[in-house]
Image (cartoon, coloured by chain):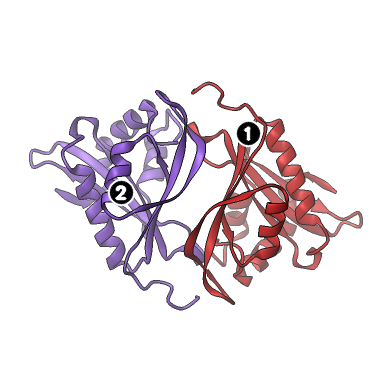
Chain colours: A purple, B red
Amino acid sequence: MLRDARAEDLADIAPVFRAIVEDGETYAYPQNLSDEQIAALWMEPPPSRCIVAYAVDGTFLGTAKTGPNRPGRGDHIATASFMVAPLAQGRGVGRALADEVLRWAREEGYTAMQFNAVVETNTSAVALWQQLGFRILATVPRAFRSTRHGKVGLHIMYLEVSGSRGASTS
Amino acid sequence: MLRDARAEDLADIAPVFRAIVEDGETYAYPQNLSDEQIAALWMEPPPSRCIVAYAVDGTFLGTAKTGPNRPGRGDHIATASFMVAPLAQGRGVGRALADEVLRWAREEGYTAMQFNAVVETNTSAVALWQQLGFRILATVPRAFRSTRHGKVGLHIMYLEVSGSRGASTS
């Protein structure tokens, strides 16, 4: 059900990416991106990783991307982003993707995971991250223009994981 | 003394960029970037802006880049980054660049400016931003591997400015 994305998965990822961005409640990506632009933003090469979730009948359920939150001297902390297909919401897909992303981050030696922009009115996502142990470090006030709620805050969320990356200062 | 960067300014920007990144105290950029990679990271096209500072004798003093912190529904908040040439430090160059960046952000209608990663041990920068009214929203613990101090925190700093960008939710 969960595996690394392949180039041909873009045909499933792109329509869901566009639907979620156009809905205007969760992501500050530009609208009207081409397939190639979506692939560049979402299906990043290593050291990042893009995961896809499919049902046994082949239905596309969702996708996540993860990797270093910063390059260079900040690359011991990971970040991640998640998109669940609108028709698959409420079925545990986000949780399954998050479990795999956190497992991978630990295996890769990251010391923490940071989310930079969780829309505060996206309460199901905020609740899921808090269940997984993330805490809200800060909320940037009125930083996201939600379709339905106007300007709302963006949470910066953070979870320590057990990695040893960057134990030296190099 | 301050003006918009031109392509040929890369010859002055790149060595300062490399010296500051290699010093390892203030920026989580990769080391050993090519001139082209530095230009792509630092001299971004509109809606971003890159500024350079030169002394009257033509000595390069420093540079700043500014623009939207996020695309799409987050593009009403600006961000900025600053690099002062090592030989020009302590002469008010950072302050002059910051004043111009904030003036421009107001003129462009941004509602706030957010710094995403101010190294907590970069005390002169933190003090300058606080003098200008920025407050620390949060500090991401141990998020930067400093050459001299080991793992130190990254401040997220924030200042409201007077713009009206994104007054509608579009």
Query: What x and y, as percent, mark residue A3?
Result: 20, 52
Query: What x and y, as percent, mark residue B28?
Result: 54, 62
Query: What x and y, as percent, mark residue B133?
Result: 69, 47
Left or right, A80 with respect to A29, comes to left
Q: Which chain's residue wears label 2?
A: A
Q: Is residue B75 above or below residue A95?
A: above
Q: Which one is nearer the viewer's eye here, A168 or A149?
A: A149
Q: Is residue B85 above or below residue B52?
A: below
Evaluate whether residue B52 shows in this view: no
The residue singled out by tag 2 in the image is: A129
State which mark lies toward you, 2 or 1.
2
Q: Amino acid at mark 1?
A: Tyr
Residue for point 67% across, 64% down: B123
The residue singled out by tag 1 in the image is: B110
Residue for point 51% across, 42% down: A140
Element class at badge 1: loop
Q: Amino acid at mark 2?
A: Trp
